[in-house]
Amino acid sequence: MKRFCMFLAFLAQLFSGKAQKDGFAKYPVYKGTDLGLTYTNIRSNFKIWAPTAQNAQLLIYEEGTGGEVIQRLVMHKGESGTWWTVIPGDPAGKFYTFRV
């Protein structure tokens, strides 16, 4: 019974908060459909939405876990709070993360 009451309290807390902060509406809206990775074997385009970022990087790894960064690419500020970069060639089999 105690666990059930704790679960109910958790659900009440979870659903009682606001989904968005009041200042969220001040950020630009990006209506494109190309966020993330757009891959081809000729080049790959990376785009993220990070309107509050001061800078952004794309980090490339050889391994999915525990590996070292093998390439750092500076991302360029785009429209409506986006950041983008392009990798020429075929990066198939590589892993990536973004740093903002």
Image: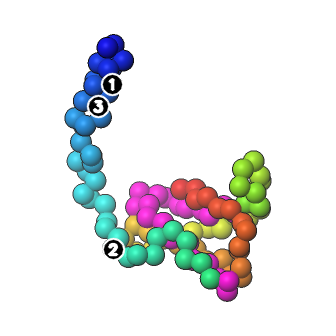
* Secondary element at tag 2: loop
Quarter containing the N terminus: top left
Q: Mark 3 near mark 1, Cβ–Cβ under 8 Å? A: yes
Name the residue carrying label 2.
31
Quarter location, residue 34: bottom left
Separation of residues labelled 3 and 1 (CA atoms): 6 Å
Q: Is residue 56 magenta?
A: yes
Q: Position of residue 48 (x, y in %)?
A: 48, 66
Q: In front: 16, or 71?
A: 16
Q: Position of residue 63 (x, y in %)?
A: 76, 57
Q: Which mark is residue 74?
A: none
Q: Nearer the viewer, mark 2 or mark 1?
A: 1
Q: Nearer the viewer, mark 2 or mark 3?
A: 3
Q: In front: 5, or 26?
A: 5
Name the residue carrying label 3.
11
Could you tell me which residue is drawn at 72 percent across and 50 percent down?
A: 65
* Secondary element at tag 3: helix
As drawn, the residue found furthest toward the bottom would be: 42
Could you tell me which residue is drawn at 60 percent across and 78 percent down?
A: 39
Name the residue carrying label 1.
7
As drawn, the residue found furthest toward the top would be: 2
Quarter location, residue 31: bottom left
Q: Tell me if residue 34 can be seen.
A: yes
Which range is magenta?
Answer: 41-60
Separation of residues labelled 2 and 3 (CA atoms): 33 Å
